[in-house]
Amino acid sequence: MYFTGFADEAARDLTTQIQATKEIGWTRISARGVNGSNIHELEEAEFEAVANQLDEAGITIPEFGSLIGNWGKPISSDFDITLQEVQRAIPRMKRLGTQTIRVMSYAQEPWGNDQQEEERFRRLREIVSLFAAEGLTAAHENCMNWGGFSAEHTLRLVEEVPGLKLIFDTANPVFQKDRSQPQANGDFPWQDPLAFYHAVKEHVVHVHIKDCTNPPAGETEPAEYTLPGLGQARVKEILSELKKTGYDGGLAIEPHVATVFHAVDGEEPDWEQCYSSYVEYGKAMVKLWDEVVAES
């Protein structure tokens, strides 16, 4: 097992991302954004400079947090956009020695609308096969996409898309309704992170660690993002299950404590706070894992 994290929550520039990573005592970054652009959207010269800087700093990249099929793209979006993202990502993953890329199953349509499941399956089959042909692993995250509607939806993806693996995010179920359950009082219940994990665990190759509390009534964002183990994501219980089963993949922190990537409000984050909270989060993650190990 190893630690990594989305260091673009600490800083936009790579130099400061590396500094934050080393301050925690880690040597890995889950690559997502550098200078405000996703790793597969950088200009070629800028990407090569990033790769060289990572090499010089001794930082490795176990995961690409891509934009492929993410919560910002409806299933009606042009598939050529996705295919171009895939073609840019493949050589960059090889350059950085990255095995796993995070993908999603396109944005959720309002519940009750046509979700175009077959088109989602078709696209994901092609995405997965393109990466697999290069010896790379595409792994689906249970975010605000079709697969995030419930554990059953995620398992349907695995069934329909040969070779698809999973990235499990501990907190995403906390602010997602479970569409596989019956409604009560006109609404679906919140998902249970631990139950979701148990349902999909045999397909999980990577884990994102964040924690939060259920959204207020009528809202879609959590009331609060917390340090790991202090919210409703059942982080410590999930870590205990991972330890019990001999999980040897990555634990990637995605704090969202100071920077919420789903929020679109145009406000510039307080980057000093982002940096300090990221480092604090990383150290809290190590402490929590040590507690789990000591109790096992």
Image (cartoon, rainbow, N blue to C red):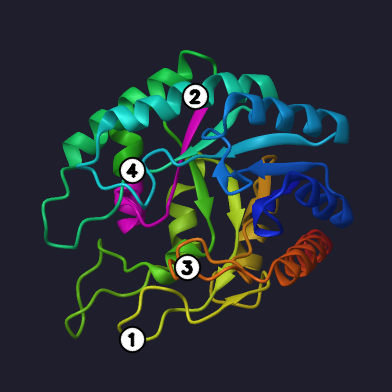
Cα distance between the residues tagged 2 and 4: 19 Å
- The residue singled out by tag 1 in the image is 217
* Magenta region: 136-155
- Say which of marks 2 and 1 sits in front: 2
Residue 206 located within the stretch drawn in magenta = no
Q: Tell me how far mark 2 sits from mark 1, CA to CA.
A: 41 Å
Q: Relative to 229, is 197 above or below?
A: above
Residue 99 position within the rendered picture, expressed as x and y whole percent measured from the top left: 61, 27
Q: Is residue 159 visible?
A: yes
Look at mark 2 in the image and give the residue it sits on: 88
Residue at the (45%, 67%) spot, across then down: 263
Q: CA distance from mark 1 to mark 4?
A: 26 Å
Question: Is 91 drawn above or below residue 286 in the view shown?
Answer: above
| Mark with earlier residue (2, 1) | 2
Residue type at the position of mark 1? Ala
Query: Residue placed at 87% from the left, 50% from the top?
Result: 22
Residue 1 lies in quadrant: top right
Q: Is residue 247 visible?
A: no
